[in-house]
Amino acid sequence: MTETIIFYMLTAVILLSALGVVLLPGLMHSALCLGLCLAGVAGIFASLGSDFVFAAQILVYVGGIAVLILFVVLLAGSASDKIVRQVNDQWLPSLLICAAFFWAFLKITGYFSGIPAAAAPSPSVRAIAALMLGDYAVPFELISVVLLASMTGAVLFGRRKAQ
Amino acid sequence: MTEETIQPKVLEPVFNHANGRLLMPETRYWPTDMWKSPWSLPTYRRGAAVLAGLILGIAGVAWFIGEIGPRLAPIYTLAEQFALSYGVPAFWIAVVWTFIKGVFVLLAPALNALFAVWWERKISAHIQSRMGPMYVGWWHGALQTLADGIKLFLKEDIVPDCADKVVHWLAPVVVLIPAILVFAPVPFGKDLIYANIDIGTVYVFAVGGVSVMGIIMAGWSSGNKFSLLGGLRSAAQLVSYELPRTFAVLPVIMLAGTLNIADIAGFQAGYWGGIVPRWFIFYPVVGQVAFIVFLIASVAETNRVPFDIPEAESELVAGFNTEYSGMKFALFFLSEFAYVLLSCLLMSSFFFGGGAAPLPFLDFLPSWAWFLSKTLILMFCFLWFRWTFPRFRVDRLMDFNWKFLLPVSLLNIAAGGVLIWLLS
């Protein structure tokens, strides 16, 4: 009962803010709605009982990526004006693409939608750590190599041109 | 006819024993005038007696009250049995209990702001040889913050014409709500904790980071270039200093082997050789470096001097909160002081053993008293820094973080690994 109420409240927040990302005039409002949407997803994680994914979602997505997007919008000049038309006339292809993705997601999630969630959050940090640094250590380190490469690339692009 | 000339009343200065010099009678002096002879022995004796009386009195009250957490548990059980006997469902008891606990957590930042603002004004005044607030309240302007709070409530709420109204209204809320939510997994003493969750440390850093969004919102929505610049700088600083702050705690987590803040504090119980407490600050090199990095990054994270260039009055007209007035402005300050309290609570949990006594024979005082005194001493440092160091320039601020604090904290993680290997 409680879980259902919380689930529908969070879903309403996520869907409305996701619509806001697409429909609101002004890039800044869209970016803020994106932050709210990601926070709602974190709430879903918390209600499903996975505490670490909840905290990581807030830490990385709301506190990191949404803030980064806000920075980009602030530094983008006239794109951060209060009212900017954000849509072009290609709404029909985008609608079709979205419908295709929606159908695909519906098919995929249909396999897992009947699985009940754990009632209370159970500590999952140790299990995640054992998997990340034990069984899956090599893929985990490979991801960090990718991150290192992208950071090096950013430094290269960000460096001033030699006189 | 005798003419009676009215003689003007001649006042002679009288020696005042309280401050050891000549004062005019029937004259109201400024509080600062009463302080002109700084080495007057009677004043100092009285001050020392008041201070010692305060400390001993608070310690006595704490000893008399004893541990709060274990004493509240039977009261809760009693109330629960009472409610159950009237057929209240257990679910609703849990909901009501959560709300009651939530009110206490909400009180922590509010009362802290009331006290800390007054304390900061007194400390700043005494550092600058002033008296600070003296009139409101019965003792040394003790109710000054309350009066200021009422004043802020009554003030007009001004919203600029070119402001984005909704975002402008939401920004203080987005800053304040995380500042209250972060107190959930933080212990205030033995068993005095709202939510004893397993990922407390990650939760605190994650939720605390959401406030950055509110600062950007405040800066952007004000429709003012100084606010925008201040918001950008402030957000950049907060995002940058979060990294060394988080990395500084990693050796603590590695040693304690848990992310639960209360468990980390409990891990440091006990004494080496019966005298030196097993606090993390006393672990050789790693502990001290971690503490100093965490302290510096915490001061920067709360946007306080010397790291307050984003809200500097002289450079940016007070930065992101320029266009805020009344209670909205006060909310920014409430959250700033809430984060100061949070940093001090975290430091006393991570590095100073939480509620443990510094010496074995002192443990007759309850854990919450030790927690409170450690937190207040650390908070004094925060307020002290503000009136001691000059501001950083904005580029040096960033250089200091990325080129000094971050490498040091990364090296410290490696040193922490070596320390664990040596200890095992």
Image: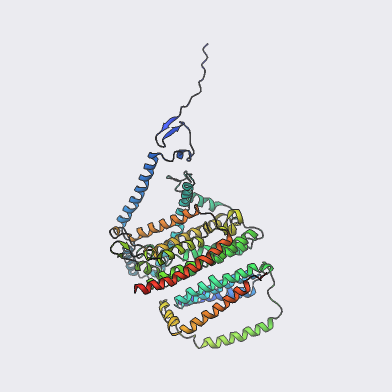
Can residue B395 be seen in this snapshot?
Answer: yes
Estimate the x, y position of residue B109 in percent, counting from the top left: 46, 59
Estimate the x, y position of residue B418 in percent, counting from the top left: 40, 73
Q: Colour scheme of this structure image?
A: rainbow
Q: From what the image shows, is residue B36 above or below residue B195?
A: above
Q: From what the image shows, is residue B48 above or below residue B163?
A: above
In the rendered image, which quarter is residue B313 located in? bottom right
Estimate the x, y position of residue B59 in percent, counting from the top left: 33, 53
Front position in the image: B89 or B372: B372
Estimate the x, y position of residue B140 in percent, counting from the top left: 44, 45
In the rendered image, which quarter is residue A148 located in? bottom right
Q: Which residue is painted at 61% across and 55% down in the image? A: B315
Question: Where does the C terminus of chain B fall, quadrant-wise?
Answer: bottom left
Q: From what the image shows, is residue B130 above or below residue B342?
A: above
Of all residues, the one furthest to the top in this rendering is B1
Front position in the image: A154 or A74: A154
